Image (tube, grey):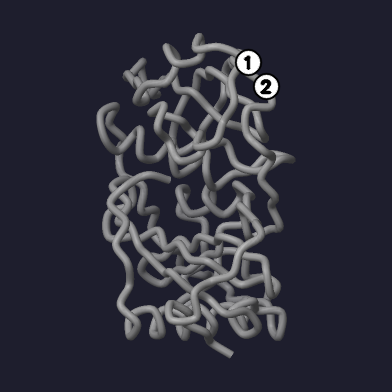
Amino acid sequence: MPGPWLPLAESEAQAFLERLTSVLVRSHGPAAFTQKLPISDLRVMPLSFYPGWLLVEGEAQLAPNELGTFNVLYGPGFMWVIDGESKVIHNLNSGSIPDMGSLVDGKEANVPKVASPAFLPSPLIKLDPSVTGPDYLRFFCGSVWGDEGPFLLVESPDAAILQGATFPDDTWRKHIKPITMKRVDDSLTAEAAVIYANSLFSAKFKVQNGEVFMEDDDPLAGDVIPKQRYQSPFRNVRASTMQTADTTGVR
């Protein structure tokens, strides 16, 4: 997701990972990936549509020569490692996630049962068609995956996802532009180019009460980039080795 990403200093990264690990251990036990895998390159971006919340991104060394990217949604009393499913986002937007008085994992299954739980307030503000609406669409499409990964919005011919892409001609270029969004009654409608799997589409969306619907899509070009690999919660799984000097690990 494009935006004003800021790298975390080493002390900030360590503190974040310790907090994330405590949340994941509570919900996943020894399977918590932050206990087993070296983590590097942590960075954060404030979310305009969830004021006071952050999107955190990092790289995990999945194998000696393999890296994967992961994201964490982080807000007051809440941490969730984004895994491609929409349920947590919908529950958060509707104010349906129990507030247990400390940081909770959005997917936590082993929460204690209480008679009348309090709930985290929805952080979602009213979206506008100029800033918060497009930002939310980018976030949602990148966080909710289909069978072959996320839906990546392409707003510039120089977008990172298109580096190394091969097209049969230049007709696709006229479809690549910043998201155009407008308000229609109680919803927002948008048009954008989308990479899904390894193909480029022109798509129309509707955003309403935090729900996103793809109402139409037209293929522009197929097999233009190599298929990226996904292994939830990791995306863009690739052959690579992190730089030792930039590695922050929690065991």
| Count of picture labels | 2
Left or right of 67? Residue 124 is left
- Report x, y in % for residue 137: 43, 35
Residue 219's label in the rendered image is: 1
Left or right of 115? Residue 120 is left
Report the residue at 55% width, 36% height from top.
164
- Report x, y in % for residue 66: 67, 66
Query: Identity of the amino acid at label 2?
Result: Gly
Query: Identity of the amino acid at label 1?
Result: Pro
Q: Which residue is mark 2?
A: 222
Report the residue at 57% width, 36% height from top.
151
Report the residue at 59% width, 69% height from top.
241
Q: Secondary structure at mark 1?
A: strand
> Label 1 crowding class (10 Å Cα cut-off): few <14, some 14-19, many 20+?
some
* Any part of residue 112 in sight: no
Q: Is residue 227 above or below residue 109?
A: above
Q: Are marks 2 and 1 in contact (CB under 8 Å)?
A: yes
Residue 20's label in the rendered image is: none
> Label 2 crowding class (10 Å Cα cut-off): few <14, some 14-19, many 20+?
some
Left or right of 171? Residue 131 is left
Q: Is residue 79 above or below residue 222?
A: below
